[in-house]
Image (cartoon, coloured by chain):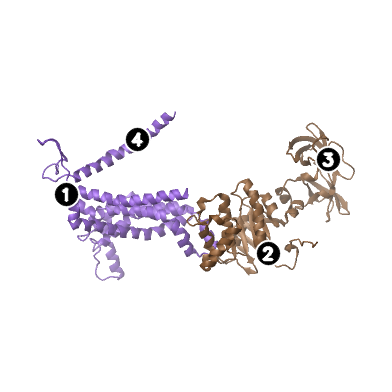
Chain colours: A purple, B brown
């Protein structure tokens, strides 16, 4: 009986794990392998890691030089920092816009909530790429935004927004806002409202009650939303590529350039691996906090 | 020996109530939760609002706390119209049914929360928190988080958090509903003890009549948004003023009938269900032909195989059901009319007399003074 049950569980768990192994873990390992190899002119554009043909027997050729190169050229550090900075600013903006939105939806009358949530998720119905392209039309010099500002008389000369970091932040905030709103909503919606009544009952005005009760209790939602925005924003390529300019230094763009322009697969792989490590760290911190919280409330 | 003055400020026409509801109505859309309620509660009372769920008792309490504003009418606390005063400015505190303890704060921080809002100096907060935790016997738990406490301990912390504020009125929303039975009975007496010691007026909402009877100085029985009767536990049990209250509180045998005559504080009522006329003490005046209901509590009736003595009301029937509960036995006697009467028999002796048993023809009797005439 229990053996059958265990077998059943195994069979249910197998497809997703098999999928992840074949399409995520193995590619990751391949990338990691390439990052340790040496570049060459040819197809593939890197030398094999294990040299079978040598007369001196089988030889393992591990090249850590690609990683050293990342430290050597300050372009990479600048690109990583640039990514972290723009992702950080975007996350903060998403939080500032997303928190009130999530709060408003969570406190809206029950009949409204589903429609409002649907509106948050509505952009997903259109392709991400098309939506980013649409922002070009809005932000460009003779675009909708400049047209509106000129018409209103707020500015006399069109602003250069497209091809700046501002455009990248706007694009990222726009694209990732739902990932901030949804976990925050889930957190705020399940909050026990009698806690706010208790706070009021004990002499606490509404805004102070928000600071003393709602805000601390929504920290898990804030963390969840921030991670969901920050992590993909760090590695973002499409938005900086389409909306950013020559000043926009982000690691996704550097990776693209190494891979396609320089055809240096080993360095590009090393960049990717370094980025993965950089992104896994905050996720692990987040999971650790979540775990501790789960322990605490058990 | 000095005679102890009974606590009954509601009998003193000169006394000013601490809380006064003046024709208070509360509507939620089309639904009227509370309708034209007049209510006066006095300093030092333990007042219970008793009723089934949806009767409006919680809405009444929430209006007192300030979470709901009356649609009509006014509420006074200590002579001040608080109808439009927000909850954070009212001299009342509420103990929530869920306790509503802040999960991210320790017991100490929870209790101190209300005092910090008042801007009390830190040293005094510390003393005050220690005192109230002492009062509810939670001294050793100051550093714990709510989730590390049992249900009974959380309830104490919630109480301490209210008491710390020294409110004029402490509101309790089903305070014992979340506790198991044994703890509940113990806590009932403890709550009364604490209330007695701190002298704060308590207003409690409950659906449990045993709880209301045990703890309250007075009870307001509510139904469909109205207060049906206000009185001491004895009043509402012994002298209900309506069929609803008689039926809601305890068990009651009720017979519909018509007045056929009367005088000298006694009515004769014809009850078709009983087969013949019965006599009931009644101080008011009712004309012959008036429809009334006669109510008799099961413990005020006797069941026996012998015909009762002259002067008692009686009827006869067969035993439809009986249950031996140890201290008492419950008999259900079916009359010829099909009407069932519930009678309680105290098991006074170990053995000896043979109590009425299945198959026995029995007489049920009661004194005219132990029946009540209800006109509503």
Residues behind callouts 4 and 3 on a single chain? no
Mark 4 and mark 3 in contact? Answer it, CB < 8 Å. no
| Left or right of B299 on screen, residue A197 | left
Please state the total of marks drawn on the protein image.
4
Q: Residues within 10 Å of mark 4 (few under 14, many from 20)?
A: few
Residues behind callouts 1 and 3 on a single chain? no
Residue bearing mark 2:
B43
Residue bearing mark 3:
B315
Tag 1, which secondary structure?
helix
Mark 4 or mark 3, whichever is nearer to me:
4
Q: At which x and y percent is residue B244?
A: 71, 50
Tag 2, which secondary structure?
loop
Residues behind callouts 3 and 2 on a single chain? yes
Mark 1 and mark 2 in contact? Answer it, CB < 8 Å. no
Q: Seen from this angle, which residue lies furthest front?
A: B140
Residue bearing mark 4:
A14
């Amino acid at each position: 009986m229990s053996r059958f049950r265990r077998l059943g569980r195994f069979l249910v768990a197998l497809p997703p794990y098999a999928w992840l192994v074949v399409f995520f873990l193995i590619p990751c390992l391949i990338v990691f392998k390439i990052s340790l190899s040496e570049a060459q002119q040819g197809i593939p554009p890197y030398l094999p890691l294990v040299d079978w043909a040598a007369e001196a027997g089988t030889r393992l050729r591990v090249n850590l030089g690609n990683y050293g190169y990342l430290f050597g050229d300050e372009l990479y550090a600048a690109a990583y920092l640039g990514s972290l900075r723009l992702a950080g600013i975007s996350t903060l903006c998403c939080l500032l816009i997303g928190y009130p939105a999530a709060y408003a939806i969570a406190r809206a009358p029950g009949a409204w909530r589903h429609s409002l949530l649907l509106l948050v998720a509505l952009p997903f119905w259109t392709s991400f790429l098309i939506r980013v392209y649409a922002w070009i039309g809005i932000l460009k010099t003779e675009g909708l935004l400049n047209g509106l500002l000129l018409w209103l008389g707020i500015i006399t000369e069109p602003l250069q927004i497209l091809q700046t970091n501002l455009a990248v932040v706007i694009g990222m905030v726009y694209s990732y806002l739902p990932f901030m709103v949804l976990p925050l909503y889930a957190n705020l919606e399940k909050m026990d409202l009698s806690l706010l009544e208790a706070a009021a009952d004990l002499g606490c005005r509404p805004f102070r009650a928000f600071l003393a009760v709602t805000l601390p209790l929504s920290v898990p939602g804030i963390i969840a939303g921030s991670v969901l925005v920050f992590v993909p924003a760090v590695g973002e390529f499409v938005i900086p590529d389409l909306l950013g300019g020559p000043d926009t230094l982000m690691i996704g763009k550097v990776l693209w350039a190494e891979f396609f322009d320089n055809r240096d697969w080993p360095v590009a792989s090393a960049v990717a691996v370094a980025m993965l490590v950089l992104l896994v760290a905050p996720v692990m911190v987040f999971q650790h906090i979540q775990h501790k919280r789960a322990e605490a409330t058990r | 020996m000095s005679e102890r003055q009974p606590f009954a400020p509601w009998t003193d026409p000169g006394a000013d109530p601490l809380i006064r509801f003046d024709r208070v109505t509360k509507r939620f859309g089309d639904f009227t939760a509370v309708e034209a309620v007049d209510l006066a509660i006095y300093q030092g009372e333990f007042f219970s609002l008793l009723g089934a769920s949806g009767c409006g008792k919680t809405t009444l309490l929430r209006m007192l706390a300030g979470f709901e504003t009356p649609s009509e009418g006014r509420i006074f606390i200590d002579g001040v119209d608080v109808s439009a005063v927000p909850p954070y400015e009212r001299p009342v505190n509420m103990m929530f049914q869920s306790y509503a303890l802040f999960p991210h704060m320790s017991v100490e921080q929870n209790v101190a929360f209300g005092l910090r809002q008042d801007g009390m100096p830190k040293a005094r907060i510390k003393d005050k928190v220690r005192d109230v935790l002492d009062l509810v016997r939670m001294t050793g738990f100051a550093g714990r988080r709510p989730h590390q406490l049992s249900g009974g301990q959380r309830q104490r912390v919630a109480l301490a958090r209210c008491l710390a504020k020294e409110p004029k009125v402490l509101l309790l929303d089903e305070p014992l509903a979340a506790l198991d039975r044994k703890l509940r009975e113990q806590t009932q007496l403890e709550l009364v003890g604490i209330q007695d010691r701190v002298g704060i007026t308590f207003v409690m909402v409950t659906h449990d009549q045993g709880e209301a009877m045990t703890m309250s100085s007075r009870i307001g029985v509510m139904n469909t948004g109205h207060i049906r009767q206000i009185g001491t536990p004895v009043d509402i049990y012994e002298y209900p003023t309506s069929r609803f209250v008689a039926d809601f509180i305890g068990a009651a045998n009720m017979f519909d009938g018509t007045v056929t005559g009367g005088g000298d504080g006694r009515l004769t009522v014809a009850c078709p269900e009983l087969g013949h006329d019965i006599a009931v003490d009644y101080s008011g005046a009712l004309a012959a032909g008036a429809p009334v209901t006669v109510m008799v509590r099961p413990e005020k009736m006797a069941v026996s195989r012998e015909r009762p003595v002259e002067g008692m009301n009686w009827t006869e029937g067969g035993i439809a059901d009986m249950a031996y509960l140890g201290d008492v036995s419950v008999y259900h006697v079916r009359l010829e009319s099909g009407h069932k009467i519930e009678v309680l028999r105290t098991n006074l002796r170990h053995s000896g007399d043979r109590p009425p048993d299945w198959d026995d023809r029995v007489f049920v009797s009661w004194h005219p003074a132990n029946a009540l005439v209800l006109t509503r």
